[in-house]
Amino acid sequence: MRIGELAARAGTTTRTLRYYESRGLLPARRSGNGYRTYDDSDLRLLRQIKTLQDFGFDLEETRPFVECLRAGHPEGDSCPASLAVYRRKLGELDALIGQLSSVRETVARQLARAELAAEAEVPGGPEPVCELGGDSWRPE
């Protein structure tokens, strides 16, 4: 198949396919007339790349999965290098989840403190102060 058909079947653009080719992720085969030619195995590569990118993997992180498929494995994640990328990505995700949990706890504490202060507010009392971010904020 030619580049336009592959792009349509993969749900991407010809520009993207040329970029993948320049990065060595998609083979650069040419027919006798100079047109790029592709087959169903190339479509499998593209689907693997797209799936991983949809999950937040960057393009370079997809390389071991593509190489695994090219080596003839039925799945792109059945090779040791692919498994290592999964492990590394899970570590990154766990770290991000930890950071988000910490921020959530801080915001929850601030909300609880602010709600208590709002309930106890009396006319002429102190102005509310936001303690997030270090700088004091006062309503105008």
Image (tube, rainbow, N blue to C red):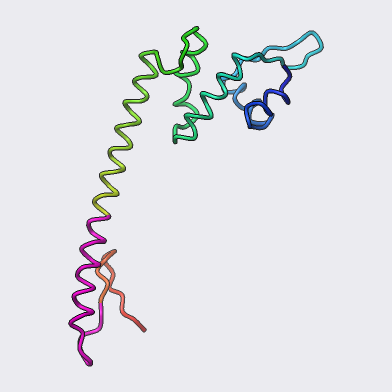
Which residue is situated farthest in the right direction here?
33
Range of the magenta residues?
A: 104-128
Position of 128 compared to 40: left or right? left
State left or right for residue 82 relative to residue 98: right
Q: Quadrant of residue 8?
A: top right
Which residue is found at the position 37% from the left and 24% from the top? 85
Coordinates of residue 30 in the picture (x, y in percent): 72, 12
Q: Is residue 109 magenta?
A: yes
**Which image quadrant: the C terminus?**
bottom left
- The quadrant of the picture occupied by the N terminus is top right
Q: For this rendering, which residue is in front, 7 or 95?
A: 7
Q: Specify the principal SS of the magenta part.
A: helix
For residue 2: magenta?
no
Residue 18: give x, y in percent of width and height.
Answer: 66, 25
Return the residue found at the far bottom: 124
Q: Residue at x 29, y 49 (%)?
A: 100
- Left-right relation of 128 to 36: left
For the image, the number of numbered tags is 0
| In front of the other: 114 or 138 | 114
Relative height, residue 89 to residue 35 (above, below): below
**Residue 33: which quarter of the image?**
top right
In the image, residue 25 lies at what x, y percent?
Answer: 56, 20
- Pinpoint residue 105: horizontal percent, then vertical percent: 22, 56
